[in-house]
Amino acid sequence: MTPHSPSDAIPAQPRNPLHGMTLEAILTALVAHYGWPGLGERIAVRCFTHDPSITSSLKFLRKTPWARDKVEGLYLFMLREQRRQG
């Protein structure tokens, strides 16, 4: 049995903008771009609208796949908009 390197287990995804991004990095970028009020308007969940914080939002998003999907989708949308503008 031969040992495998970590790169054997995960195929490279050079065109996937989410590849290698942590949920915390995605959320931090969204908050920096939209602010908590803007994020709460775009994705209506309590962790963004009532006493928001990165920690509480990460806890919720890790347990709630549909909300995480929305956050990742908004992040991809933000990247497309930035590319169009820049």
Image: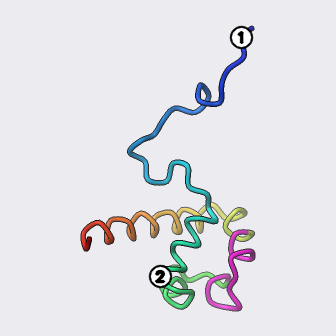
The three-letter amino acid code for the residue at tag 2 is Arg
| Label 1 sits on residue | 2
Query: Which region of the structure is painted magenta?
Result: 47-58
From the viewer's perspective, is 82 left or right of 9?
left
Q: Are marks 1 and 2 in contact (CB under 8 Å)?
A: no
**Mark 1 surroundings: few (<14), some (14-19) or many (≥20) residues within 10 A:** few
From the viewer's perspective, is 83 left or right of 67?
left
The kind of secondary structure the magenta stretch mainly shows is helix
Single out the mark in the foreground, 1 or 2: 1
Q: Position of residue 13 (x, y in %)?
A: 45, 40
Say which residue appears at 62% left-offset and 62% top-offset.
23
Q: Is residue 54 magenta?
A: yes
Say which residue appears at 55% left-offset and 49% top-offset.
20
Q: Position of residue 70 (x, y in %)?
A: 51, 68
Residue 55 lies in what quarter of the image?
Answer: bottom right
Colour convention of the picture: rainbow
Residue 79 lies in what quarter of the image?
Answer: bottom left
The three-letter amino acid code for the residue at tag 1 is Thr
Say which residue appears at 41% left-offset and 41% top-offset.
14
Quadrant position of the N terminus in the picture:
top right
Mark carried by residue 42: 2
Q: Position of residue 60 (x, y in %)?
A: 71, 71
Mark carried by residue 70: none
